[in-house]
Amino acid sequence: MYIVVFIIILAVLVLIHELGHFLAAKKNGIRVEEFGFGFPPRIWGIKKGDTLYSINLLPIGGFVKLFGEEYHEENAKHRSKVDADKAFINKTPAQKAFVIIAGVLGNFLLAWILISYLFTQGVPTPTNKVLVDKTLKNSPAEQAHLQPGDQLTRITVGSKMFTLASTADLTNYSKKFAGQRVIFTVKSQGKEKNIMIIPRLSPPQGEGPLGLLITSYEEKKYNWYQAPFYGLIHSYTITKTIVIELGKTAFNFFTMKKTNVDVAGPIGIAQYTGQAIKFGQNAVLELMALLSLNLAVINILPFPALDGGRLMFILYEWITKRRVNKNVEKYINMFGMGTLLFLAAAITIHDVLKLFNR
């Protein structure tokens, strides 16, 4: 089941990316020769105007074939003026850049829409708060009538007061002061109150001195008219985090340092999809939004064969007023594609090894 869901997610992400290129090309008067769902061989197709809309056998995304983009660029230069005006190669650098960036914008827009929707449903969001998730039966926490959602802000033991800045603080202090009278300051339903609890010296296995489950995640929920604004902010925050972590990973890679970031390929992502399915629809949509932002960031990197690499060639053309030699561009892109395929293979092997080492 999770394999099917993973394929659907992948197909939607790639299709949205290509749809961005498609719409931008149409907007700038570029002839789109084919807009395909899936990858060849072709199963079915219908031509409307200049564009062939096709459904292909491999349902893992889609593609856009632009007139005058790569394989027939030289022919595009020598067509009639009407045809030449519709060729990608003959458009201004700004128009070309917009077409290239549109795919990334499509992925960001999809993530924004998904996150905005999730905010209307309620999304667990990390905070610096220490929150009660659940109290265990016959535990000191239950006897003190702590409720899910209560925030523990500080404790007082004798004349000493300690601020609870993290869940780790609560865990450490409850063990340190086990068997003693501890005053907990609790925020509950907007009001602050003090509760006396004596943490257990010898609690049942797995329950801890207080007998409660704690979390730093708080559910955030917004009205439909608020959600797009907060969804945009959250999308930006996630994107910034991805960029920072990607930069750290690249730095550690080139300096031969160990990285703490767990990089996953298709197999790893498929496993994450399986885990998300267990938590329900919203978890799957959250994963989809995260993957869409990852795809956007990866694609905009200034690396050959990626959208960002193509932007670098367009930037060169804009600055120098001449195109990069077609053979140079071809070999640079071949190098980039080879490198990407090597990395993809290495990550996939890593995923397989992790699978068998469990």
Image: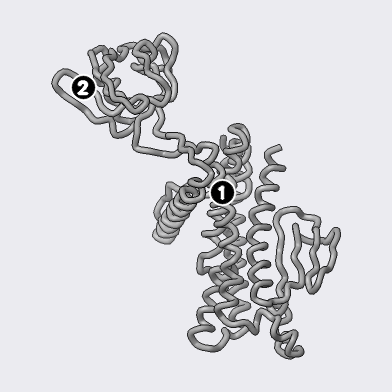
As measured in the structure, the alpha-carbon distance from the residue carrying label 2 to the one carrying label 1 is 43 Å
Figure coloring: one colour
Is 6 or 53 nearer to us in this picture?
A: 53
Q: Quadrant of residue 322?
A: bottom right
Front in this rendered view, residue 200 or 8? 8
Disc on res. 156? 2
Q: Position of residue 99 (x, y in %)?
A: 61, 71
Label tally: 2
Q: Which mark is residue 195?
A: none
The image position of residue 76, as x and y in percent, is 72, 85
Task: Find residue 8 and report its horizontal and vertical position in percent.
Answer: 70, 47
Q: Is residue 22 above or below residue 230?
A: below
Q: Is residue 143 visible?
A: yes
Residue at position x 29%, y 21% from top? 174
| Residue closest to the far top | 138
Closer-to-camera residue (31/5): 31
Whether the residues at callouts 2 and 1 have beta carbons within 8 Å, the answer is no
The amino acid type, in three-letter code, at marker 1 is Ala
Answer left or right for 20 relative to 51: left
Task: Assign the C terminus to one quadrant of the image.
Answer: top right
Q: Position of residue 166 (x, y in %)?
A: 32, 33
The residue at which mark 1 appears reads as: 289
Give the amino acid at mark 2: Thr
Q: Residues within 10 Å of mark 1 (few under 14, many from 20)?
A: many
Residue at the image position 26 percent from the left and 19 percent from the top: 194
Q: Earlier in the sequence, mark 2 or mark 1?
A: 2
In this rendering, position of residue 201 left or right of residue 238: left
> For the point 69% across and 76% down, which residue is it?
30
Identity of the residue furthest to the front in this view = 225
Q: Secondary structure at mark 1?
A: helix
